[in-house]
Amino acid sequence: ADALRTAFEPFWGPAARSRGLLGVGLMVEPPMDAQVDPVAERAARDAAALLEGLGHLVEEVQPPARFDDLLETFTDLWAAMVSLGVLFGELVSGRAATAEDLESLTWALHERALATPASQYMRALTIIQRVARGSVEWSSQWDLILTPALATRPLRIGSLETDGPNPMDTFRASSGFT
């Protein structure tokens, strides 16, 4: 019975238990080439100071890896996920999607996915999983990693031209704030 209770503990359960002092890694430098918005950085530093004022141990840390070289690898995976939505739409509608049915960014990602060999997709999946696992292993030194919520301030709706003539440029530009 205890094992079942532990297996189905609510998400917030561990946070509700007192753990004493926490080890906090403050990471304000993003893992890719992006300028951190000063307001976002200040908020993270203020939160770190609050935690330190409560007696927790705060240490400024650097990202475990740089992700700048992973954009193309990530794009192979993202394109496949977008394409899956297009393919399900085709299944439901009973007809093949066309460029006129979709925003140009969705169409470009769908075409990329269709042109990506399965072996390349599996390679990308393996690389991203390895990087993610390495990041999780790295972060286990602390009880939590505190970061700015986003590198840059959220964009206004419509700021990214997802239906423009250069959809993949728009996709690459979106990586700077996410």
Image (cartoon, helix red, strand yellow):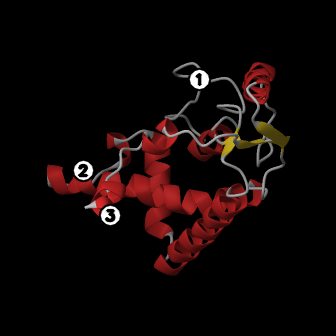
Amino acid type at mark 2: Gly
Check residue 96 in the rendering and tell me which mark sits there, or answer none: none
Check residue 3 in the rendering and tell me which mark sits there, or answer none: 3
Quadrant hosting residue 41: top right
Q: Residue furthest bottom?
A: 119
Element at badge 1? loop
Q: Calculate the distance from the C-alpha at mark 1 to the C-alpha at mark 2.
A: 26 Å
Amino acid type at mark 3: Ala
Per the image, the residue denoted by label 2 is: 89
Element at badge 3? helix
Amino acid type at mark 1: Ser
Q: Calculate the distance from the C-alpha at mark 3 to the C-alpha at mark 1.
A: 49 Å
Per the image, the residue denoted by label 1 is: 159
Locate the N terminus and report the quarter of the image it occupies. bottom left
Describe residue 145's horizontal placement relative to residue 86 as left or right: right
Q: Nearer the viewer, residue 37 or 20?
A: 20
- Residue pictured at 16% horizontal, 49% vertical: 93
Describe residue 114's horizontal placement relative to residue 49 as left or right: left
**3 or 2: tag closer to the N-terminus:** 3
- Residue pictured at 31% horizontal, 60% vertical: 2
Q: Position of residue 8 (x, y in %)?
A: 31, 53
**1 or 2: tag closer to the N-terminus:** 2
Q: Calculate the distance from the C-alpha at mark 3 to the C-alpha at mark 2.
A: 42 Å
Q: Residues within 10 Å of mark 2 (few under 14, many from 20)?
A: some
Q: Which-is-in-front pick, marks 3 and 2?
A: 3
Quadrant hosting residue 160: top right
Q: Are marks 3 and 1 in contact (CB under 8 Å)?
A: no
Q: Position of residue 88 (x, y in %)?
A: 25, 55
